[in-house]
Amino acid sequence: MPASILVVDDDPLVNDFLYAILSESKFEVQRAYSGEEALERIGEHEFDLVISDVKMGGMDGLELLDRVRKAAPDTVVIIITAFGQIGDAVRSMKAGAFEYLVKPVGADATEAVVSRALEFRRLKVENRMLREAVGRRFAADQLIGQSAQMKRVFEMIDAVTSSRATVLITGESGTGKELVARAIHYRGPRREGPFEAINCAALPETLFESELFGHEKGAFTNAIRQRKGLFESASDGTLLLDEISEIPPALQAKLLRVLQEREIQRLGSDKRVPIDVRVIATTNRHIPTEIAAGNFREDLFYRINVVNIDLPPLRDRPADIPSLTEHFLRRYCTENGRPLRRVSDAVVRLFEQYSWPGNIRELENFIERAVVVASAELLTPDDFPRELVTGGPRPKTNTVEPGMSIHEMEKHLILATLEAEGNNQTKAADRLGISSRTLRNKLHEYGLRGPTAANEADPPKPSIETVSAE
């Protein structure tokens, strides 16, 4: 995307000259003839660079510089001064201007200073984003596991990082889907670009389009300035659409068009803006079931499901619980200034038996709570929430006992598979190797509740090849 520059000078000749040479260089240029007008434009539009005369009627360039630094800290300012007024230029540099130009302004000198200023801004924004990334818990360091399931997940992450393919990360809540998305971003060639994320389940439907695509001033009530959407903000980086299955159906067609054409259109604008963004999506739903229910577009599913990484629930990877426990103990003991804790054998047994409905997030919360409330170095069951102690081992609904009939064994197997798949009939049928219709007939035969509307027909199976960690 071309850099956006605002030229501010009350001398029409200088203003016209700068506008002409910068426009020829393919920059997006706007201009103002006073400091007051410049502030209005800055309130409406995000500029990469402001070039301002220091001597103007009303608000001068030094005051404008101060106001710009407060309103738009990432915007770089170049000051123009007349020959013999170098003192003003020095004061502007001390006040935070990047550079100054001396009148009469030449084309070559202007282009050279503008080029350096824009490179400075790029590095400034990049360093800020890197500091923010370091301040956050770095995702790649949080992916822990030695189980066969997690090894396949790691292999998939390594396989997709260097590509620009859209990735769909599936799995139950709390399994670490966002951590996988961040690992893909920070290990790939876009690591120096931004990582933007939006929780589609938490955003009101009326704000979706503005958040994703941006808007122009006046596009709707309270749109008092231009605003870039997340697709533009994530340019040269990654955009995470968390819980994409929650996007309202009316917006799914617009999202599909953006992914196909790689350009967006802000609300209130007829201009199309090209984007270069890697899109990663997550969901805890079974999208083919949502398609069958009419809640999700099949063509959008094919577009986002180029590569699928499926995260196993914690109950299916008990081998990883000890290493995860040790990791969270180290982290929260350090963060809370506690001596390093360890868990008793009784706690280990409870961890092995517990079903972990909240997955890794629940384990993390249990550990953090125990570290904070416990007074002894050895953590016992009394230091953990009551549900860990009372939850006990999961009932063995698939137990086969001598003397059972084939019919009873079949029923136990079907019900156990349904339980393991969270009562999702489509997933259970796939796992059993039967059709959804056959499964529904069996449930009817057992006198259990019939299918929901979402399961009235077998959902279409995606034709695009996917890779699962199961």
Image (spheres, rainbow, N blue to C red):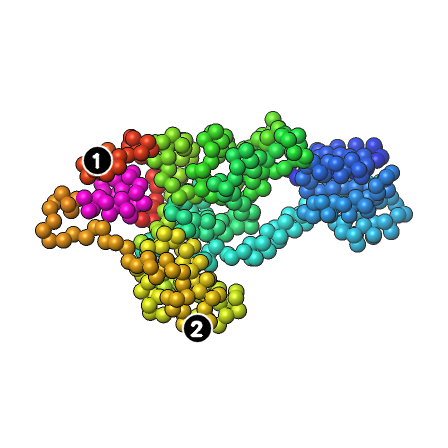
Q: Position of residue 301 (x, y in %)?
A: 40, 35
Q: Residue at x 45, y 42 (%)?
A: 243
Of tags 2 and 1, the one toward the viewer is 1
Q: Is residue 430 magenta?
A: yes
What is the quadrant of residue 109 in the picture?
top right
Q: Which residues are magenta?
A: 411-433
Q: Nearer the viewer, residue 303 or 437?
A: 437
Label whose residue precedes the other's in the sequence (2 or 1): 2
Q: What secondary structure is marked by label 1?
A: helix
- Residue 21 seen in this snapshot: no
| Circle 2/circle 1 CB separation < 8 Å | no
From where the camera sits, is residue 177 visible? yes
Please give the name of the residue rendered at 34% of the width and 35% of the height, measured from the top-left corner.
Answer: 289
Q: Quick one: 20 or 245, which is closer to the camera?
A: 245
Image quarter where the N terminus lies is: top right
Using the image as rendered, state which of residue 397 and residue 49 is in the foreground: 397
Instruction: Return the residue at label 2.
Output: 377
Q: Position of residue 405 (x, y in %)?
A: 11, 46
Q: Is residue 24 above or below residue 65?
A: above
